[in-house]
């Protein structure tokens, strides 16, 4: 049983970050005549269809490589900074390890939030599909 309030806060914060990071952005449509005629429910179904078509034709809806790249970059920067401070304070190895761990954690969080952005090719495909159906995509949210 977890009784430490600090541990509960960490678990709750981790869950919240995962929920935010995993939610995918979707197109936002301008309320033109076509959207008003078909309604939101039909429009959402057609957005889903365009997303499915985009995936079927080889586009990726997310940029999962961004997370790994950002984590590795953060780890490298953290290791360099940690090694430098370790050299000043006496333990290069320990400083590099601590810096790498901290940098990787920050890089991972940064990558998780950036990965919510759809891949540019996927985004263009979905927007083109929606325009062909009579909608006017104005952004992603």
Image (cartoon, rainbow, N blue to C red):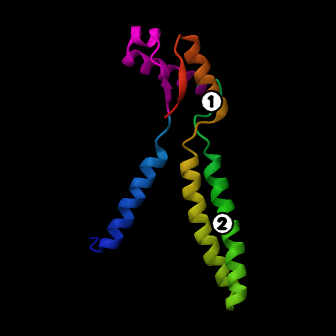
In the image, taking residue 73 as reference, residue 34 lies left or right, namely left
Q: Name the residue: 69% across, 73% down.
A: 79
Look at mark 2 in the image and give the residue it sits on: 75
- Element at label 1: helix
Work out whether 131 lies above or below 117: above
Look at mark 1 in the image and give the residue it sits on: 122
User: Residue 85's image quarter?
Assistant: bottom right
Query: Which mark, residue 78?
Result: none
- Sort mark 1 into few (<14), some (14-19) or many (20+) by Cα contacts within 10 Å: many
Query: Magenta span covers which residues?
Result: 26-55
Q: Name the residue: 64% across, 23% down.
A: 57
Magenta stretch: includes residue 46:
yes
Image coordinates for residue 126, horizontal then vertical, percent: 58, 23
Give the residue at the far bottom of this rendering. 90
- Sort mark 2 into few (<14), some (14-19) or many (20+) by Cα contacts within 10 Å: many
Pointer 1 with pointer 2, Cβ within 8 A: no
Image coordinates for residue 116, horizontal then vertical, percent: 54, 43
Q: Quadrant of the N terminus?
A: bottom left
- Element at label 2: helix
């Amino acid at each position: 049983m977890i009784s430490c309030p600090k541990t509960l806060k960490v678990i709750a914060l981790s869950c919240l970050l995962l929920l935010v990071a995993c939610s995918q952005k979707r197109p936002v449509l301008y309320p033109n005549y076509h959207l008003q005629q078909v309604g939101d429910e039909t429009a959402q179904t057609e957005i889903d269809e365009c997303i499915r078509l985009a995936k079927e034709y080889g586009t990726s809806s997310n940029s999962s490589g961004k997370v790994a790249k950002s984590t590795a970059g953060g780890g490298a920067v953290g290791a360099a900074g940690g090694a430098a401070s370790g050299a000043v304070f006496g333990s290069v190895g320990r400083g590099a390890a601590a810096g790498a761990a901290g940098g990787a954690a920050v890089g991972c969080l940064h990558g998780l939030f950036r990965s919510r952005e759809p891949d540019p090719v996927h985004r263009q495909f979905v927007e083109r599909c929606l325009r062909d159906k009579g909608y006017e995509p104005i952004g992603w949210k």
